[in-house]
Image (cartoon, coloured by chain):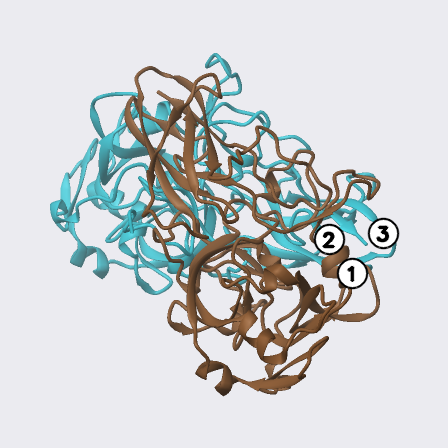
Chain colours: A cyan, B brown
């Protein structure tokens, strides 16, 4: 096997480093098992022999400290059921096409993350006046294509998001230790934000009085609406309201009769309140049934719509979701040079015979 | 699991019936394990309780007979290393798009099939004068979308191909019984032809004095070059000369330096003699190195080409293979309404930073 770490049962977008989709047609209704969680890496997997089991919490704090895994495990824990979606999910759908991993619909997975609220650790260390961000560094590092210098994967959060009660320093996924590939022993979990914020293999946590300017903050994970200039750029943060049609699959040939159109819908933080389906390419719409357990939350919901395909022909099926803050999927995506945040109305074309 | 038989580690093109690609980036150089063999079905899996363990060989023969599995196993066997490629492999690349499973590059797999030459069985039964075809019926059956009548999956071979020494009634794949999903207990193997010819779950073998006209022979697996008429239609038979670039992946972003471009090349029956690579969208070409063990055969070969990407920019990489009968991949595919036999020059676009 030329790529010993990647798995044949995930859909390959890239191999070195490893970028593989979740088998989105198969994932169980609520929980993606670790085995089928999507993988998105910026560097090769880190050498954890360099991990000390003591995490420094430092920078603009009253009491710089090191916290051990043992101490972390002993702190009060919370569990958050959260969807992680790669900012590049559905990148392959942009027109004109953009470079980068050609993710289809499977660069997202969800499950139960357990750990300590980041704010507990920050309060233990004591945030100083004038702090604006919390910078979290991962153990993964290497050279970027745009520079000869080695860098680590490091991202910052605004203080407010870092202090949010659902932002975790997590050590368990679905009641087991986080698998190595997904950030063992500690992973930042930032529910509602695209996955780049959830730094794996945490090495240190630093409170900062000024905005962080590392390349994964200011070069990557930025929306650049122009092909040839950086005009209008703004950072990638919360997940956009979105939906995917899982069945039927694109270009399927169906018999006449009743078909259940099924899929997923999600949004960064607000609950999905409505999913509209069109079977005539947007001329008319009807509401799908939502399989919503009533929890507000950070996870996707399933929806379904019974369609009676009574006559032969070609049909374009659309799904359009709306969240509680009245964000609605647009008919066209915001094209951007690096291909982040695709959330246009989902589309599948079928033929009824 | 709503689809109990399909596997999450294969790439889904359709689920009922099950159509899943092989993880083409991972398959070992020569042999695809059964687990990762692509799956292409026309109906749900058959109920093998209806299988009698006796296969009739009848029709236009001197001595109609039933042969048991035991008798088959006792006959002299041969092993043929063969690539099976779905006729719809790469269907997703046709422009304009066509309906049907949107196979990418992974609807092909190869391995060692062992069994009895079909011609031995036909000679045992004694082919009568005037026979033109051998019709092989599978146990899988159901309703097609274009008719209310139930039919079985049945295909015919011209007598000459049926009598070819490499056409087998196979019972083993990679030295193990053929897995149920791939045709247990008996599968016809027709090396060099697209996979539709290799009927799974053989139920009976019939010699015929006239051409077979079942729907999988005369409606499906026919090239229809016109969208709205059947003018110019001709049957799908041997695999076209073809190649796939496996690495880099499409829209990859590469650093400057040496990159190995790698892929596969294959043809219906003739050996691949040359694979040409272009890194400038066809302006200039150079020969790839072939990893060819010298066997003529029915399997793919690997090829590689070292490319020095010395300056930044966007590059379109092409691969074009030539076989021993001087068949060459065309620059455009033969568009056909059902999307079979795509074999245009393979193309991957990358950006060097």
The answer to whether any part of residue B346 appears in the image is yes
Element class at badge 1:
loop
- Along the line of sight, which residue is nearer the eye, B153 or A335? B153
Residue ID for mark 3: A312
B76 left or right, relative to A350: left
Residue ID for mark 1: B145
Quarter of the image for residue A129 reads top left
Residue ID for mark 2: A253
Q: CA distance from mark 1 to mark 3?
A: 11 Å
Q: Mark 3, residues whose alpha carbon is within 10 Å: few (<14), some, or many (≥20)?
A: few
Q: Is residue B89 above or below residue B225?
A: below
Are both tags, 2 and 3, on one chain? yes
Are both tags, 1 and 2, on one chain? no
Q: Is residue A44 above or below residue B190?
A: above
- Give the mark nearest the N terminus, 2 or 3: 2
Q: Are marks 2 and 3 in contact (CB under 8 Å)?
A: no
Element class at badge 3:
loop
A129 left or right, relative to B269: left
Are both tags, 1 and 3, on one chain? no
Residue A336 in the image, given as x and y percentages of width and height:
52, 24
Q: CA distance from mark 2 to mark 3?
A: 10 Å
Q: CA distance from mark 1 to mark 2?
A: 8 Å
- In which quadrant is the C terminus of chain A drawn? bottom right
Residue at x-position 46% and y-position 80% = B75
Q: Mark 2, residues whose alpha carbon is within 10 Å: few (<14), some, or many (≥20)?
A: some
Q: Is residue A37 above or below residue B319?
A: below
Q: Chain of mark 3?
A: A
Q: Are marks 1 and 2 in contact (CB under 8 Å)?
A: yes
Q: Chain of mark 2?
A: A
């Amino acid at each position: 096997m030329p790529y010993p770490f990647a798995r044949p049962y995930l859909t390959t977008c890239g191999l070195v480093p490893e970028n593989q989709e979740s088998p989105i047609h198969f994932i169980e209704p609520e929980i993606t098992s670790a085995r089928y969680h999507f993988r998105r890496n910026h560097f090769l997997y880190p050498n954890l022999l360099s991990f000390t089991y003591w995490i420094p919490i430092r920078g603009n704090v009253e009491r710089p400290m090191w916290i051990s895994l043992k101490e972390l495990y002993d702190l009060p824990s919370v569990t958050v059921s959260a969807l992680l979606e790669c900012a590049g999910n559905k990148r392959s759908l942009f027109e004109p096409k953009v470079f980068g991993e050609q993710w289809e619909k499977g660069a997202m997975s969800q499950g139960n993350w357990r750990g300590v609220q980041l704010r507990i650790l920050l309060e233990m260390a004591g945030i100083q006046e004038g702090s604006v961000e919390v910078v979290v560094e991962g153990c993964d590092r290497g050279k970027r294509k745009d520079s000869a210098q080695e860098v680590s994967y490091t991202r910052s959060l605004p203080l407010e998001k870092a202090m949010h009660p659902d932002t975790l320093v997590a050590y368990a996924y679905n009641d087991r230790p986080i698998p190595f590939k997904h950030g063992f022993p500690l992973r930042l979990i930032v529910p509602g934000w695209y996955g780049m914020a959830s730094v794996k293999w945490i090495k240190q946590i630093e409170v900062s009085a000024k905005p962080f300017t590392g390349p994964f903050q200011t070069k990557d994970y930025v929306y650049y609406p122009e092909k040839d200039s950086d005009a209008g750029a703004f950072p990638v943060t919360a997940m956009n309201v979105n939906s995917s049609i899982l069945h039927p699959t694109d270009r399927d040939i169906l018999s006449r009769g009743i078909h259940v159109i099924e899929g997923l819908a999600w949004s960064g933080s607000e609950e999905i309140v409505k999913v509209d389906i069109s079977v005539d390419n947007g001329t008319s719409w009807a509401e799908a049934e939502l399989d919503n357990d009533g929890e507000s939350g950070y996870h996707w919901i399933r929806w379904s719509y019974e369609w009676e395909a009574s006559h032969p022909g070609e049909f374009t099926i659309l799904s359009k979701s709306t969240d509680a803050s009245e964000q609605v999927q647009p008919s066209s995506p915001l094209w951007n040079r690096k291909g982040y945040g695709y959330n246009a109305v989902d589309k599948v074309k079928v033929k009824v015979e």
